[in-house]
Amino acid sequence: MNKPSHPALPDLHDAAVKGRLSRRTFLRYAALLGAGTAAAGSLPAAFRLRPAAAASYGGTLTVSGRLEPVTHPATLSWIAPVQPLRQVAEYLTYTDADNITHPFLLDAWEVNEALDVWTLNIRPNIFFNNGDELVAEDVIFSMHQWLDPGVSSPLKATIGRYLSPGGIEKTGRHQVTLHLRRPEIALPEHLYHYTALVLNHRTFEGDFMAAPHGTGPFTIESFDAHTQCRLKKRPGYWRPGLPFLDTIVFYDLWQEPSTRLESLKNAKIDVIDTSDIDELSVFRQLKGRREIRLNRVTGANVNVLRMRVDRAPWHDNRVRLAMKHCQHREKLLLLAYAGEGLAGHDCHVCPRHPAFCQKPLPRFDPRSARTLLADAGFPDGLDVDLCISDGANDIRRYAELLQSDAARAGFRIRIVTVPEERYRQSMWREVDFGITPWSHQPLETMVLNLAYGADAKGAPTAWNETRWVDPEFCRLLDLAGRTLNTAKRRSILCQLEEIQIQRGSIGIAWWKNSWTVSRRKIRGIPPSAFGYLDLHAAWKED
C-alpha cells in the first residue's frame, strides 16, 4: 500500500479487509483521507468499481431546461443555469450517487491529523479548451473568486467560514495547500458545490460567456439566453474515451412541466432537467411508461417548515413545538409526495447522511399542541400567515394539509402564495413563517452550519433564515466538524438532533426522492440527489 496521507488510513484498510466496514463507509473515509487514484489498486477486491458497459459513439442529445443569462458562475443562486456550464467547466471533486465524494480534477488530497491543513494535488496534463494547462494558479484564482466579497458567491457563506484568501498557498505547479482557520471535514464536499467551477485565471474577467474556457468534454458553440445552447465535443479531453456524444443541445422550454413532459413523450427531447420544476408531477405522469427511464435517488432534498425566532409568536418555543406537533408525517408524505421519500423528525439531518442518528418519529398530537398554545398565552388559538411559493404542488399540498390538521390544535393558518422566483430570490429569508425547499448536502455538518450556524460574534449567518442561534447547538456543531470518526460524530449528532427537535426553529415532515428523467435509450447519466446533470459519459443506444 502507498504511504498514507493520514495516520488513520492503515487502520481503515485493515478494517475493510476484515469486513468491519461497508464498501460505502470505506470509500468515504478513504477519499476523505486522501486515497486518490494511485491507491485504488490497494482497495479490497470487492470494493473495486466494475467497468462500464460498452457505449456507442456519436449523436446529438437534446435537453429541456432553463437557459438564464450567465456571467460569473460563482454568483448563481440556483442549479438550472449551471447545467450547460458544467459540461464545459469542471469541479475539483465529485460526489456520486452513493453520496461519496471523490477526487476529480484533483488526483488526491492530503489532510493532517488535526483536519486544518489540506493539500490538494491537481491531476497533471489537464488542459482548458483553449489549450492552457490546468495549474495551481487556476485553483487559487477560482477560490479567491469564491471568497471575494465583491463577487458575492454562496460559497463565501460555506468555505469562507473556515478559509480566508491568505490561507491559500501554492506549494507546487500542480499543488495547493489550504491552511484553515478551523478544522473542517466537509472541504471535499464543498468543492462540488454547483458554483465551484474551476476557471481559467488567464482569460476569465468576470463573464464566462466572453471566454468560455473550461476543462470539460464540451465547448460552447452558441448560447442564446431563454432559447437554445449548443455544445460540441472537444478534442483532447483528459478522460480517455470521453465524451461519447458529438453534440448536446439545451432548449429553454420554461418552467412549466407540461411543455417539457410532452416534448419527452413525443421524443422531441431526450432528457428533462428537473432541478427547477415540480419533480413529483414529472414522476406521477411518467411512471410506468416503458419508453421513459426514471432513475431514483433518495437524498437530503426537503421542504423545511421554518419559523423566524426573532419575531412573535415564533420567538416562543412553546408555539414552535405546538406547530411541529401538528404535522402528521406519514399522511403528509403519502398525500403531499405520493409516499416517495422518508419521514422526517424536525431536524435537518437525514438518513442518507453518514452520521445520522436514528430517532423516534414525533407523533401527530394536536391535543398537546393546544395545551402548549394555551401555556404560551393563546387559549383561544392563534392566527398565523404561512407564506409559500407557487412553484411546486408538494409545497402547496403540505401547506393545505397542515392548515387542516393544525386547526384541531387552534392554529388558524392563512396560506399566502407568492411567485416562486420572488420567494427564492428574497422572501425565503424574510417571512415570519414559510416553507422553504432546501437541496441535498452530502454531510450533515454542511447543512447545519449553513442553515443554523452563527458567526464569530454569535449572530446568525447569511443563510440562517430562521435566525435561530443556540449556543449549545453551535458548540456541538463545531465539535462535530472536527470529528472524523463517524461513530463518534454520530454520538454528537444524537445530541444535536435532539436539541433541534426540542427547541429548534423548523419542522421536517419528510425527505424527498429525486429522479433523473430521460428517454429509455439514453444511458450513462448518473442519478444525482443534487439535481445535477452530468452528461460527460452520456450516450445513445442504437
Image: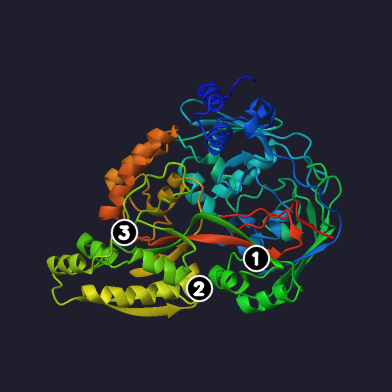
Q: What element carries label 1?
A: loop
Q: Is mark 2 on a helix, strand or loop?
A: loop
User: Is residue 458 visible to the viewer in this orientation of the structure?
Assistant: no
Label 2 CA crowd tier, 10 Å (few <14, some 14–19, many 20+): some
Q: Where is residue 439 in the image (x, y as percent from the top left)?
A: 50, 58
Q: How many marks?
A: 3
Q: In this view, does 377 lie above or below 139?
A: below
Which residue is at a point 29% across and 63% down the rendered structure image?
324
Amino acid under disc 2: Ala
In the visual, does 229 lie left or right of 162? right
Q: Is the Cβ of the residue at disc 1 closer than 8 Å to that at disc 3?
A: no
Mark closer to the observer (1, 3)? 1
The quadrant the C terminus occupies is: bottom right
Instruction: State how far apart marks 1 and 3 are (Cα).
Output: 32 Å
Which residue is at a point 81% across and 45% down the rendered structure image?
237
In the visual, does 81 lie left or right of 482? right
Amino acid under disc 1: Asp
Q: Is the Cβ of the residue at disc 2 closer than 8 Å to that at disc 3?
A: no
Q: Is residue 172 above or below residue 346?
A: above
Amino acid under disc 3: Ser
Q: Name the residue under label 1.
A: 273
Say which of 304 and 234 sits in front.
Answer: 304
The quadrant the N terminus occupies is: top right
Which residue is at a point 72% across and 37% down the rendered structure image?
135
In the visual, does 465 lie left or right of 408? right
Q: Mark 3 points at which residue?
A: 505
